[in-house]
Amino acid sequence: MPKRKRYDLGEGVLSWPVGEVPFLSQNCVALLGEGNRWVRFTDPPVGQILRLTAVIRTIRGPVLEADLERSVAPSIPFPEEQIVLGYGVLFSGDPHGLGATAIGVLPVENVLRADDWLDRFALYRAHNHIVQLRAETGRAPHIVRQRTPVIAA
């Protein structure tokens, strides 16, 4: 069995980029580092087929509202939980004019809806927590997901 290769991309608060480029806002993640500054991904392995993974380092409170239209709601992860955000060809973007501050994967299989390049359940689970963002070789594991969001009354 070939050894898996892992690329540590950065550590920070997981978010998605905001800005003038909707494509990047909808299909990428970004990290906020110290001083609420966007983390720049130096030399990411762009063009390789990888799984994008967030390892939870510190749990913070969820800040997203449930999205009833898409049937997804935030959930609280466990410390050191590895959350697979997506699997496919890694790419980076520059939505903030600071270099590569957004990263995503172009799916190689039709496993998600056409408008979901990243796993929306995983994104809502990892959002706003401090994570170590990684890109790893190897297939994405099958994950059982919540089908209906849990909404507090």
Image (cartoon, rainbow, N blue to C red):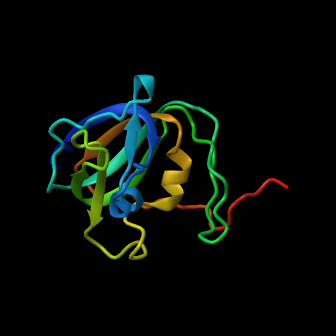
Q: Is residue 30 visible?
A: yes
Q: Is residue 69 above or below residue 27?
A: below
Residue 24 in the image, given as x and y percentages of width and height: 34, 58
Residue at image point 64% right, 36% down: 61
* Residue 140 seen by the camera: no
> For this rendering, which residue is in front, 83 or 73?
73
Q: Quadrant of residue 23?
A: bottom left
| 73 relative to 55, above or below | below
**Is residue 36 rendered to the left or right of residue 43?**
right
Give the tally of numbered discs. Answer: 0
Q: Position of residue 58 (x, y in %)?
A: 52, 28
As drawn, the residue found furthest toward the top would be: 34
Please identify the residue farthest to the right as the structure is shown.
Answer: 153
61 relative position to 24: left or right: right
Give left or right: position of 138 versus 73.
left
Q: Position of residue 81 (x, y in %)?
A: 49, 39
Name the residue at 63% across, 63% down. Answer: 67
121 or 128: which is nearer to us?
Answer: 128
Q: Residue at x 30, y 54 (%)?
A: 104
* Vertical comparison of 142 with 112: above or below: above
Picture coordinates of residue 84 (x, y %)?
41, 51
- What residue is at 45 percent from the left and 47 percent from the top? 83
Q: Quadrant of the C terminus?
A: bottom right
Quarter assignment of residue 144: bottom right
Q: Is residue 32 above or below residue 140?
A: above
Q: In the image shown, does 28 or 130 lie closer to the viewer?
A: 28
